[in-house]
Image (cartoon, helix red, strand yellow):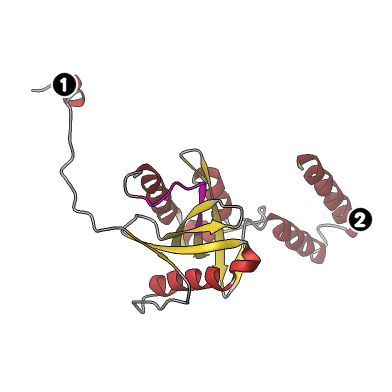
Amino acid sequence: MTTLSELISRGITPEPKAQNKPNVETLSAPIQAKSKKPHAKYEVEVFNFLLANKEVLGIKSVMKFTALLVDGAIELLDDKRLALEIKFRMNWEKACQAECQLRNFMKETDRRPFPVDGGIVFFEEFSGDWNRKADCRFLENGWSHWYRGHSVVDGLRVDLLRLRAGKLDSFPMGDAIVAKIGGLMKTGRLTGEEASRFLEQLGAVQDNRE
């Protein structure tokens, strides 16, 4: 029987994989979904939203990719380029897929059209455990799960953004805290004076961070 040391010391070359020709399309007009499936319609929704709001979002160009592992990229007015990956539902499995796709895209220097400075993953809604929120927490689990375990790929920052019903959201800590405090005040578990003191302390912490 071959020893484990012999097995793991062999030189191994994976079998060749057929690859479609990559394509980069810089969008100048809204695109149409090629399928009626929800994830296909959502992908088009994201691209069209970015294109329609280029100026306010500080985007120079929106690019859609074919056969390049990720869905596309944007170039910002400050010349930063960010890879885009779009997931209709976001959970642990989809987060792992997105992270893997971004990592492999960054590694394929011979196929990718240009290097990137980071990435953005868009989603519409959390699902499964990522959609849960304990009473003691401000946010759905998914926000912290992403930034705890998936937001850095090969040293580059990858942000999670939710586009839902035409509204763009990022890590919503401030809004979530205010909503939580409001709920506690309504149930009598927190007084107005306590809420004000807590918000003042939170503001001081934020000022020190800046």
Figure quadrant of the C terminus: top right
Q: Where residue 42 sits in the image (x, y, percent)?
A: 45, 72
**Relative to 26, is 138 above or below?**
above
What range is drawn magenta here?
112-121
Crowd around label 2: few <14 · some 14–19 · many ≥20 (10 Å)? few
Quarter-wise, where is residue 16 in the image?
top left
Q: Where residue 135 sits in the image (x, y, percent)?
A: 65, 57
**x 37%, y 42%: residue:** 107
**Cα–Cα span, label 2 and label 1:** 70 Å
Q: Is residue 36 magenta?
A: no
| 199 horizontally vs 36: left or right | right
Q: Where residue 20 sits in the image (x, y, percent)?
A: 24, 58
State the mark number for residue 6: 1
Residue 126 can be seen, yes or no: no
**Relative to 49, is 113 above or below?**
above
**x 32%, y 49%: residue:** 111
